[in-house]
Image: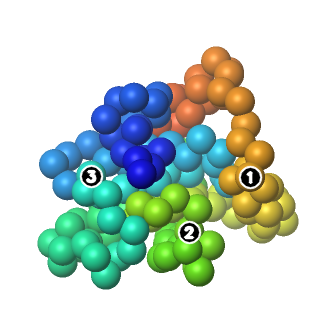
Amino acid sequence: MTTIFERIISGELAASFVHQDSRCVAFMDINPITRGHVLVVPRRAVATLDRLDAITRAHLWETANRIGRAQRQGLGSLAQHLLVNDGKDASQSVPHVHIHVIPRYGGDTLHTLARLAWHITTLTVPRRETPARRGRLEAAAAAIRDAL
């Protein structure tokens, strides 16, 4: 079974990319918890971190770290949540390793918690793509890319 991330990586589905290299890609989450929410995904489709080779696993974390730094510089975030749901029983929605890099802006705890709850509901009721939504994702992606 092909995952949505494999379809994004292959170019079959649209995405707002922040970073691409031979081991991983990073793109904007289609249902962001906060402005600038990025997913860092290995090109190789494996479900859990323990199935990745050590070099790729380390590379994912280094890429997530670089993206967090770029979010602070390019978007003005103050901190980041790095989140991994590693396996179905950990509420992993797509069976393909991915690190969420979620920027935090200070004073946004209630908003972020509400968006997190909302984000979970979008897994069962996906939102429709619109030009305005894609435009916002592209603008945030460009700011992060420029800061990388």
Disc 1, SS: loop
Q: Can residue 52 be seen in the rendering of this structure? A: yes
Could you tell me residue 7's position as x and y percent? 40, 38
Asked if labels 1 and 3 touch by Cβ distance under 8 angstroms, the answer is no
Instruction: Identify the residue shown where x is 59% and y is 23%.
Output: 135
Q: Quadrant of residue 50?
A: bottom left
Marking on residue 108: none
Does label 2 or label 3 sit earlier along the sequence? 3
**Residue at left 77%, top 46%?**
125
Q: Nearer the viewer, residue 82 or 8?
A: 8
Q: Identify the residue position indicated by label 2 in the image.
A: 92
Type of amino acid at the residue the image marks with label 1: Thr
* Residue 22 placement (x, y as % from top left): 16, 48
Which residue does the numbered mark 1 point to in the structure image?
124
Q: Eyeballing the image, is 47 above or below 33?
A: below
Residue 136 lies, in percent from the top left, at 61, 29
